[in-house]
């Protein structure tokens, strides 16, 4: 059983919602970022989405855009992120780690090298924002073993395309809660619940909802229908607001994870 299956199975047995957390690798610097992730994992984070900083993060709102820029300015790269994965894996052997990237850095590295380095470091799968499922085989055909590619389903995804995505869903389905970029807009929980139910009829994969989720109340509302919640901009906002005293960031992020995780139960 892979780490995704083990995690979601255990959470389901305990009637818990998965807390999936996104942070940009290397924000604000390598060592602080690693300490933040360690604190979050120790506080109860169930799945880590490790964002690979990119110069043109078109799906991300301003908070994550700025986090990518800070990380890039401090020397973060896809190769350096692999070093971070290895360090996280050494301390947290059971934590599922998703590499959250745009396709350009992977193309620059080379698909075979990406797969080899990611699996050697201990990553469990990838979510590539701008790689449509129709084009995904150009990457996944280079994989020599289990390394799921997680796809996004949006409110604007057509029924035909949604069916295609769900037919090959692995690890979990990432359901975007609304149109727009990360960190903006309001949550329509009734609409989200309806979309979750529709997807549940078409796949046995866990369903995690992201975009716009930031509070324990959000977690409770979404978690009553979905298997997991994805939070990113809210974590990065805490990092950005605490840049003047970076040594305090791991404790702050760990405390926030504990508050959110309490709402998952």
Image (cartoon, grey):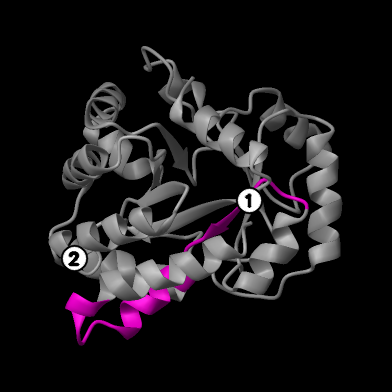
Look at the picture and state if 174 lies above or below 234.
Answer: above
Check residue 34 for magenta coloring. no
Residue stretch rendered in magenta on the structure: 225-248
Residue 182 seen anywhere in this rendered image of the structure: no
Q: Which residue is mark 2?
A: 32
* Of 24 and 3, the residue lying toward us: 3
Q: Considering the image in quadrants, where does the C terminus appear?
A: bottom right
Instruction: Give how far across and how far down residue 96 sits, in percent.
Output: 41, 38
Mark 2 Cα shell of 10 Å, populated few (<14), some (14-19), many (≥20): some
Q: Which residue is mark 1?
A: 17
Q: Quadrant of residue 133?
A: top right
Secondary structure of residue under mark 1: loop
Residue 112 relative to residue 215: left or right: left
Look at the picture and state if 175 lies above or below 172.
Answer: below
Instruction: Give how far across and how far down residue 196 sits, in percent.
Output: 78, 47
What residue is shown at x 64% (from left), y 23% (from top)? Answer: 168
Q: How far is mark 2 from mark 1, CA to CA?
A: 28 Å
What residue is shown at x 51% (from left), y 52% (from top)? Answer: 20
């Amino acid at each position: 059983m892979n780490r995704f299956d083990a995690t979601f199975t255990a959470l389901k047995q305990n009637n818990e919602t998965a807390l999936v957390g996104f942070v940009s690798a290397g924000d604000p610097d390598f060592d602080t970022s690693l300490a933040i992730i360690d604190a979050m994992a120790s506080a109860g984070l169930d799945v880590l989405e490790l964002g690979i900083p990119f110069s043109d993060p078109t799906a991300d709102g301003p908070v994550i855009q700025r986090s990518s820029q800070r990380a890039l300015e401090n020397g973060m790269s896809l190769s350096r992120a692999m070093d971070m994965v290895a360090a996280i894996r050494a301390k947290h052997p059971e934590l599922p780690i998703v590499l959250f990237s745009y396709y350009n850095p992977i193309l620059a590295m080379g698909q075979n090298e990406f797969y080899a380095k990611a699996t050697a470091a201990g990553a469990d799968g990838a979510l590539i924002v701008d790689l449509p499922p129709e084009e995904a085989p150009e990457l996944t055909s280079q994989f020599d073993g289990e390394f799921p590619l997680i796809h996004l389903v949006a409110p604007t995804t057509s029924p035909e395309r949604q069916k295609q995505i769900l037919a090959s869903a692995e690890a979990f389905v990432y359901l975007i809660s609304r149109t727009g970029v990360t960190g903006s807009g309001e949550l329509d929980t009734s609409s989200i619940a309806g979309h979750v139910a529709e997807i549940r009829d078409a796949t046995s994969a866990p369903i995690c909802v992201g975009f716009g989720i930031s509070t324990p109340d959000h977690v409770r509302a979404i978690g009553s229908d979905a298997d997991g919640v994805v939070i990113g901009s809210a974590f990065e906002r805490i990092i950005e607001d605490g840049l003047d005293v970076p040594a305090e960031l791991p404790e702050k992020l760990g405390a926030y994870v504990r508050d959110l995780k309490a709402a998952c139960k």
